[in-house]
Image (spheres, rainbow, N blue to C red):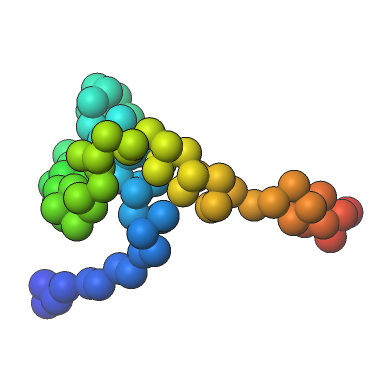
């Protein structure tokens, strides 16, 4: 099988939130969460790439930036209600 690279594009908000989540996942017992060791290398590579691409993770106001990004990415309450109505 050919080993071509895949490019994933994320917004800065998506990258920030994903980076934080990956950091928390890596700080837990990764083997409990991810049962296939083959998945570990891509997880670490993705986390490392995000860390290098996000200088804001070292900013004094990182927590506020992360909270703001999470708020922007969460669906609005109206969107959730309409999605629920559509599925009925």
Question: Can the viewer see residue 42 in this picture?
Answer: no
Q: Is residue 74 visible?
A: yes
Q: Position of residue 48 (x, y in %)?
A: 15, 48
Identify which residue, 21 or 42, lies in the foreground. 21
| Image quadrant occupied by the N terminus | bottom left
Which residue appears at 36% of the width and 64% of the height? 10
Position of residue 44 relative to residue 32, above or below, is below
Left or right: where 73 falls relative to 75:
left
On the image, the x and y values in percent for residue 50 come to: 22, 53
Q: How many marks?
A: 0
Placement of the C terminus among the 4 image quadrants: bottom right
In this image, 34 relative to 4: left or right? Answer: right
Residue drawn at (23%, 52%) of the image: 54
Depth order, front residue of 16/37: 16
Name the residue rendered at 55%, 52% in the picture: 72
**In this view of the protein, which residue sits in the foreground, 69 or 30?**
69
Of all residues, the one furthest to the front in this rendering is 60
Name the residue located 23 percent from the left edge and 72 percent from the top edge.
6
Quadrant position of residue 63: top left
């Amino acid at each position: 099988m050919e080993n071509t690279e895949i490019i994933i594009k994320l917004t800065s908000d998506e990258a920030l939130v994903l980076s934080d989540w990956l950091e928390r996942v890596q700080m837990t017992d990764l083997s409990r969460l991810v049962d296939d060791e083959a998945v570990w290398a891509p997880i670490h590579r993705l986390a490392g790439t995000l860390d290098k691409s996000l200088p804001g993770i070292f900013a004094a106001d990182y927590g506020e930036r992360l909270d703001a990004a999470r708020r922007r990415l969460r669906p609005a309450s109206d969107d959730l209600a309409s999605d629920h109505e559509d599925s009925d």
